[in-house]
């Protein structure tokens, strides 16, 4: 077993033990640091003791080793804008987006044997046992189909599906006990939704159906390129697909400005199509889920396990929120936000006005009919500066509507990608056609 491969701990008892050791190690570090600071004449806050570099390394290393729902939750929380988790913790968890171990040879052998039988070697032509990608729920291997086409096999880590509920509950308990979440906040509805979504994401047969749905919707659009499912190499725990070549989407930064702008405009346009036409959104904004073909200019779309369907009532209310924002209609924004599921508080209350001001700030790029310069955007800094205002209303904090959390996670990921590529996109121009009745 190499440093790049670690056995996936399976079974509730083993995974709970990992969480227990994680909590114990964090508590020991907090006590040691607290004693040190008191001896130096300081009176540290518990939160400051928790968010030390040592605890950060311990947290991310343990979650990366566990993979499954534990690591996936860390990745999801890392997209938080600072109003649900402390910004420091979200930054710590952000390292999980690129942290993953492959499973060792014996576990890979076990999964492949269960999926294809003892003689699976004859079915997997030119199978490369060393994965070229590893993520929270599975790893990806290169191979060939029987007729010689390049293909990939996505192999799920053993035990991750069975551990979803316990992982979610254990991580939520760790956050609660740590004091990072307000004691009154009811996160049970969010946890139930997260468990449901992660169960779907761990069902590769469901992912195949989502991929087929996107192929039907986008297959004739030559601006995009999607893999195709290989049914003979697919089951609930392995997923065979045609291989789609390309370069990392981040490498578009080396293209000329017009091409960078076109690529990001295309991704934002795709999100609008997903929301308001398909009502089916691939909600995982990980950069690895996009690639780019420099020869054709096509954007390659990958990994549809985190896709989510939305009801017409939700997308209609979200459209009304955007319409009211563009029209600078504060009352209309409030009505639409409450239809979506936000609790804004009494009319004229400071909490209500603060939330509406933050929403106006976040959606400002949509209201101006000119290219928005992501590379020089002051929006993240302004939001960070205003986050303290929300901290003053901790007694009003509630878990955001689950559907909104998934949409904002996707939008946040695209914003980060646009910033990375230094793109300029006229968001207003893209949005307007979708606001017409």
Image: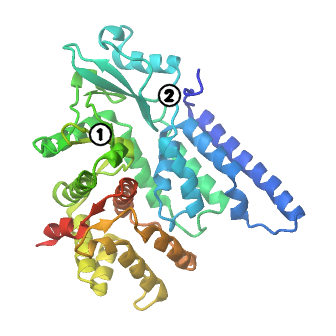
Q: Residues within 10 Å of mark 2 (few under 14, many from 20)?
A: many
**Which of the numbered marks, if any, corresponds to residue 102?**
2
Q: Position of residue 369 (x, y in %)?
A: 22, 74
Name the secondary structure under disc 1.
Answer: loop
In the picture, which quadrant includes the N terminus?
Answer: top right
Please give the name of the residue rendered at 57% of the width and 31% of the height, measured from the top-left corner. 9
Horizontal side, residue 16 vs residue 428: left or right: right
Determine whether 66 is above or below 27 in the image: above
Can residue 200 be seen by looking at this rendering? no
In the picture, which quadrant includes the C terminus?
Answer: bottom left
Q: Is tag 2's residue or tag 1's residue first in the polypeptide sequence?
A: 2
Please give the name of the residue rendered at 47% of the width and 72% of the height, measured from the top-left corner. 383
Which residue bears the numbered disc 1? 302
Name the secondary structure under disc 2.
Answer: loop
Q: Residues within 10 Å of mark 1 (few under 14, many from 20)?
A: some
Q: Position of residue 144 (x, y in %)?
A: 27, 17
Can residue 126 be seen by looking at this rendering? yes
Please give the name of the residue rendered at 22% of the width and 25% of the height, measured from the top-left corner. 231
Please give the name of the residue rendered at 40% of the width and 81% of the height, measured from the top-left corner. 357
Determine whether 91 is above or below 246 in the image: below
Q: How is the image coloured?
A: rainbow
Outermost front residue: 256
Q: Position of residue 2 (x, y in %)?
A: 58, 22
């Amino acid at each position: 077993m190499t440093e790049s491969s670690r056995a996936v701990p399976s079974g509730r008892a083993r995974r709970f033990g990992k969480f227990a050791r994680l909590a114990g190690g964090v508590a020991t570090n907090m006590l040691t640091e607290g004693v040190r600071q008191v001896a130096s004449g300081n009176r540290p806050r518990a939160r400051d003791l928790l968010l030390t570099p040592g605890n950060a390394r311990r947290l991310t290393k343990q979650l990366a080793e566990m993979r499954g729902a534990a690591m996936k939750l860390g990745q999801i929380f890392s997209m938080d804008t600072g109003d649900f988790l402390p910004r420091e913790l979200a930054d710590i968890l952000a390292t999980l987006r690129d942290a993953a171990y492959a499973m060792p040879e014996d576990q890979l052998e076990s999964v492949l044997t269960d999926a294809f039988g003892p003689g699976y070697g004859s079915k997997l032509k030119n199978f490369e046992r060393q994965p070229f990608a590893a993520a929270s729920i599975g790893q990806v291997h290169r191979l060939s189909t029987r007729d010689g086409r390049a293909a990939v096999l996505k192999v799920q880590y053993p035990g991750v599906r069975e551990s979803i509920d316990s992982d979610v509950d254990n991580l939520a308990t760790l956050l609660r006990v740590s004091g990072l979440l307000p004691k009154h906040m009811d996160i049970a509805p969010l946890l139930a939704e997260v468990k449901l979504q992660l169960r779907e994401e761990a069902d590769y047969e469901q992912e195949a159906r989502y991929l087929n749905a996107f192929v039907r919707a986008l297959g004739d659009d030559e601006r995009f390129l999607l893999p195709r499912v290989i049914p003979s190499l697919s089951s609930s725990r392995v997923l065979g697909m045609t291989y789609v070549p390309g370069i990392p989407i981040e490498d578009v930064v080396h293209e000329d400005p017009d091409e960078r702008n076109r690529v990001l405009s295309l991704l934002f346009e795709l999100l609008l199509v997903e929301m308001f036409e398909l009502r089916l959104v691939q909600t995982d904004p990980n950069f690895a889920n996009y690639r780019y073909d420099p020869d054709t200019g096509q954007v390659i779309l990958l990994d549809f396990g985190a896709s989510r369907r939305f009801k017409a009532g939700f997308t209609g209310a979200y459209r009304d929120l955007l319409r009211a924002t563009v029209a600078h209609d504060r009352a209309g924004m409030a009505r639409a936000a409450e239809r979506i599921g936000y609790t804004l508080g009494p009319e004229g209350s400071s909490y209500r006005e603060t939330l509406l001001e933050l929403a106006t700030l976040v959606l400002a790029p949509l209201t101006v009919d000119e290219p928005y310069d992501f590379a020089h955007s002051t929006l993240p800094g302004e939001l960070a500066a205003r986050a303290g205002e929300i901290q003053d209303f901790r007694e009003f904090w509630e878990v955001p509507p689950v559907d909104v959390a998934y949409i904002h996670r996707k939008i946040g990921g695209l914003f980060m990608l646009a910033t990375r590529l230094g793109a300029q996109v006229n968001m207003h121009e893209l949005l307007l056609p979708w606001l017409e009745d």
